Amino acid sequence: MRSVRQAASGIRRAPLLSGLSIASIGVSLFIVGIFGVTGYNIDQALSGAESRVEIVAYLQDGVDEELVGLSTAEIEGYPEVEGVTYVSKVEALFRASNELEEFSDVFSDLEVNPLPASLVIQLRDHARTPTDAERVAQRLTGYAFVEEVQYGREWVDRLFQVRRIVGGGALLLGAGFAIGAVLLIGIAVRMAILARRQEISIMKTIGATDAYIRRPFLVEGLFAGLLGGIVALLLTWGSYRIVDGTLLPLAWIPEWWIGVGLLLATLLGVLAAARAVRIELKKIDVF
């Protein structure tokens, strides 16, 4: 409690410096928060697109339906496969006429159905990757009655490339602004130590340990990081509400992201303060 009171006293003695430090940290983390909301919504959109990744195996005409049924049961046993749907030639024509309304007259005038039957394979959540899709497609080509297998390989590759770029960008931006926040907290703590240089020197003269002197500054760093994180959260929430209500619908980040963000902001504050105190205390001479 003594360290908390000393930290609060230090903040009251230099409210402008403390306020600027908290505001600077809040703005830095706010930018990270904005990118976090953006990245989360992009990831949600990509997950929706990823859920539509499926493999279509087109079947030869005249294939025995009993053989197809047995093979379907075997394919459903693949560890990557969520389910298999058989689409007959008649159903394929019906779907095509509904989806391509401009050609409905053409389809209705056909004497022979040119569309093949097919098996539509849905993949499990963990298996909607280019590697898994390629592996399942290769196994499907081994069936003698399968004429062609398609799954949009280029589209799947691009989907996962975009996801990797978004994830990498979030990590780089987050790391960059985290470093900036650490530097800001360190500068604030160093300035506070310089302002109390004489007082600290006297404390060291009468026998105060470095750990005793360090604790209030660590608490100040904790407060700075936590309050900066709260400021960033409020700014991010306000920006999210403005965009969501006026420009386009957005999803808010999960609650555990917020908890982790505030925890990291607090830890950054403590670590930055600890580093600054360790460096500055070595420079203060004992009377």
Image (cartoon, helix red, strand yellow):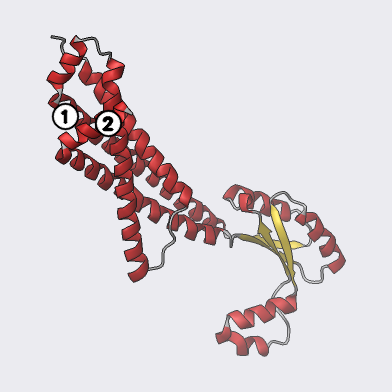
- Residue 247 visible in the current orientation: no
| Residue 71 position by quadrant | bottom right
| Amino acid type indicated by mark 2 | Arg
| Residue 6 seen by the camera | yes
User: Outermost residue toward the right?
Assistant: 66
Q: SS at mark 2?
A: helix
Q: Amino acid at mark 1?
A: Met
- Asked whether, in this view, residue 235 is left or right of residue 128, the answer is left
Where is mark 1, residue-wise?
191
Placement of 37 over or under 103, stated as above or below: above
Q: Name the residue located 15 percent from the left edge and 20 percent from the top edge.
A: 199
As drawn, 132 above or below 184: below
Which is nearer the eye, 55 or 50?
50
What is the spatial separation of the Cα atoms under label 1 and label 2, in whole angstroms?
Answer: 19 Å
Crowd class of label 2 (few under 14; some 14 to 19; many from 20; radius 10 Å)? few
Identify the residue at horizontal 25%, vertical 13% (top origin).
208
Q: Determine which residue is flagged by label 2.
A: 5
**How many marks overall?**
2
Q: Compare marks 1 and 2 and give the one earlier in the sequence.
A: 2
Q: Secondary structure at mark 1?
A: helix
Say whether residue 131 is left or right of residue 196. Answer: right
User: Is residue 252 rendered to the left or right of residue 70?
Assistant: left
Which quarter of the rendered picture does the C terminus lie within? top left
**How many residues crowd mark 1 within 10 Å: few (<14), some (14–19), many (20+)?**
some
Q: Position of residue 75 (x, y in %)?
A: 76, 55
Which is nearer the eye, 16 or 132?
16
Q: Are marks 1 and 2 in contact (CB under 8 Å)?
A: no
The image position of residue 87, as x and y in percent, is 73, 71
Instruction: Please give the name of the residue rendered at 39% of the width and 46% of the height, measured from the top-left corner.
Output: 170
Q: Nearer the viewer, mark 1 or mark 2?
A: 2
